[in-house]
Amino acid sequence: MRELLSALEARLDSPTAKGLAQAVSRAIRDEVLAPGDQLPPIRRVAEELMVSPTTVSSAWQLLARSGAIRSDGRRGTTVAPDRLGGARYTTALRHQPGSRLDLSTGVPDPRLLPDLRLPPGQVGGEVAPSSYLDDPVLPELRDALRANWPCVVDDLLVVDGAMDALDLITRTLFRPGDRVLVENPGFPPLLDLLEDRGVDVSPVGVDDSGPVLDDVAAGLSRKPVAIVVQPRGQNPTGVSITPTRARRLASLLAPTSVLVIEDDSAGDIASSSDLSLGEWLPDRVLHIRSFSKSYGPDLRLAAVSGPASVLAPIRHARALGQGWTSRLLQRALVALLADPGSQAQVRHARGEYARRRALVADRLAEHGILVPGTDGLNIWVPVRDESAAVLRLASQGIAVAPGGPFVVDGAAGGPHIRVTTGLVADAQVDVADAIAEAAGASAWSAQHR
């Protein structure tokens, strides 16, 4: 410990909180400190470096906010582990090349997206902003969104997609060591993001009505700061929260101070009713609505609503970086939302995704394989052996995602695969038959196919 303190002293340029934080950061960079190493107690650091305990405490707070260190229970304060860099998401998308039918991605069918080639006159208003200081959200887009939002909101922030929203929220509002409740199974990029932030993730099961209330109640006993849910077409299960479950969940959360983050990434392609816990908990619900799956991934547009006091630090963090989402893209979305032809295309896509999903799910049910949910682009298929099922389908030119990356822990009901039925444009029965066969495959049978 004395050697470490000497190393910090050698790297200390000024006896301030910022100076000490920089000294620790340099020690980590120079590999004097490694992930998991314990930092000395605050009082001892203060005595050895001849600074006040308040200075050391402030330095530790700066380091914790940056994710460099974290509180580790009885071990005290330790250097945070190396960042995972999307390990779950990368694994979920890893499959055999040359697939004739790639059902592993969770993306919309490009043929069902609205035509973005709108007439120039239909994209009204100024072509370019007049100033860097213009309102980050076009007033006409704000009005259009508010008119169809699932709850009354103070304000809206437009960002570059749902993951941009989640990145801003987690970076601004969460600290290493915070506990957050998440759906299990859940969305791999979100799990990667939370783990990257040093957040303690606690799983909440999902049934056909939404998050399991008993699991939420158990999780609340651990004092979480937030819960993240997908209200419609949950990825990977396709479950949508029912109005009754939403009311009961809001009642369960009401006595607490837990922040609710709703990730409605399905958006306008979801066939379930639009809802938000903001109807009952308006002072602490952040609702994210993505337009990527319904109007085009390349638009990279999502909107975030919430109470002004919660949105304020998120807005400030964005002002320090991206600043605003392209107003040209915002104008395109305004035009798409107002264009009868585009709206008809979105309605057609919504019905087509529901039809494709139902055909595959119903055929699987004939094989005795039941999948949860009724909405969205994906189904969550129970299998005998996850790797064997993926391999068996790959041998037939069909790529699917393994279930492991979607699972927070081992308590998500056994091995599964995620299948993007939204991309099964035809031959749904044949695809379902192949999935059913793969669901019963064992490791030995897959290898000797």
Image: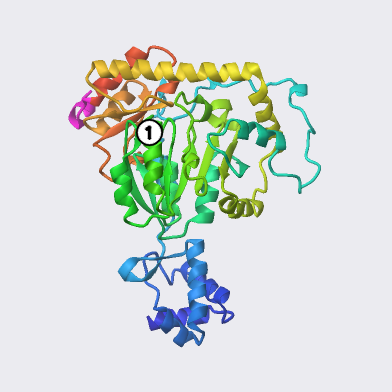
Instruction: Tell me which corner region of the image, top left, top right, bottom left or bottom right, holds residue 337.
Output: top right
Q: Could you tell me residue 137's position as x and y percent?
A: 68, 41
Instruction: Tell me which corner region of the image, top left, top right, bottom left or bottom right, holds residue 38.
Output: bottom left
Q: Could you tell me residue 75's position as x and y percent?
A: 32, 70
Q: Amino acid at mark 1?
A: Thr
Instruction: Tell me which corner region of the image, top left, top right, bottom left or bottom right, holds residue 251.
Output: top left
Magenta stretch holds residue 376: no
Q: Residue at x 76, y 49 (%)?
A: 133
Q: Residue at x 74, y 22 (%)?
A: 122
- According to the picture, the residue beneath numbered tag 1 turns out to be 244
In front: 82, or 242?
242
In front: 153, or 430?
153
Q: Quadrant of the N terminus?
A: bottom left
Question: Circle 1 sits in a helix, a strand or a loop, which is it?
Answer: helix
Q: Could you tell me residue 14's position as x and y percent?
A: 59, 80
Q: Residue at x 54, y 55 (%)?
A: 172
Q: Can I make out residue 294 in this image?
A: yes
Image check: 437 left or right of 225?
left
Magenta stretch holds residue 444: yes
In the image, residue 77 sits, relative to residue 282, either above or below, namely: below
Magenta span: 440-449
